[in-house]
Image: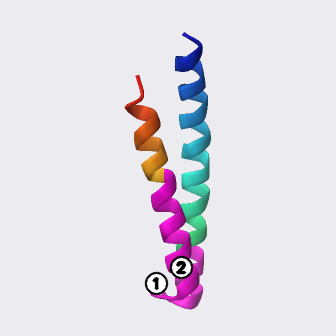
Amino acid sequence: MQTNRYNNTLRKALLVDIEAGRKLMIQIGLEEGFTSKNTIVISQFVDQLLNQLEEASTAY
C-alpha cells in the first residue's frame, strides 16, 4: 500500500514538472525558434520526465 501512495505522489509531481517544462519549452521556442539549442534541451528534459511518468505508471 505504501508503494502505491509513493507512486501516486511521484506521478503528481512529474505531471506538474512536465506541464512547467512544456510551457517553458513553448515560450523559449517562440522566442528563439523551435529548433534552437535551448528549446531542444528543454524538450529532451520533458521527454525524460515523460519516460519517468511511464515507468511510475507501470510499476504496480
33 shown above or below 41: below
Amino acid at dot 2: Thr
The residue nearer to you, when weighing 17 against 51, is: 51
Examine the rendered structure and indicate whether residue 25 appears above or below residue 3.
below
Name the element at disc 1: loop
Q: Which residues are magenta?
A: 27-49
Q: Label 2: few (<14), some or many (≥20) within 10 Å?
A: many
Q: Residue at x 58, y 82 (%)?
A: 38
**Residue drawn at 59 percent across, 75 percent down:** 27
Residue 10 image offset from top left, x and y in percent: 59, 34
Which SS class for mark 2? helix
Residue that sits furthest to the left in the current view: 58
Q: Residue at x 45, y 51 (%)?
A: 50
Circles 1, 2 touching at the beta carbon (< 8 Å) = yes
Indicate left or right for 58 with 10 as reference.
left
Q: Which residue is mark 1?
A: 34
Per the image, the residue denoted by label 2 is 39
Query: Compared with residue 19, is residue 30 higher up or lower down, i.e. above or below?
Result: below
Residue under the point 51% across and 61% down = 46
Q: Residue furthest top?
A: 1
Type of amino acid under label 1? Phe
Ranked by sequence position, the earlier of labels 1 and 2 is 1
Image spot of residue 19 (x, y percent):
55, 54
Percent x, y for residue 52?
Answer: 48, 46
Disc tally is 2
Query: Dot 1, crowdedness within 10 Å: few (<14), some or many (≥20)?
Result: some
Estimate the spatial distance between the alpha carbons at disc 1 and disc 2, rounded to whole Å: 6 Å
The front one of 55 and 17 is: 55
Query: Is the stretch drawn in magenta largely helix, strand or loop?
Result: helix
42 in the magenta segment: yes
Q: Quadrant of residue 54?
A: top left
* Quarter that holds the C terminus: top left
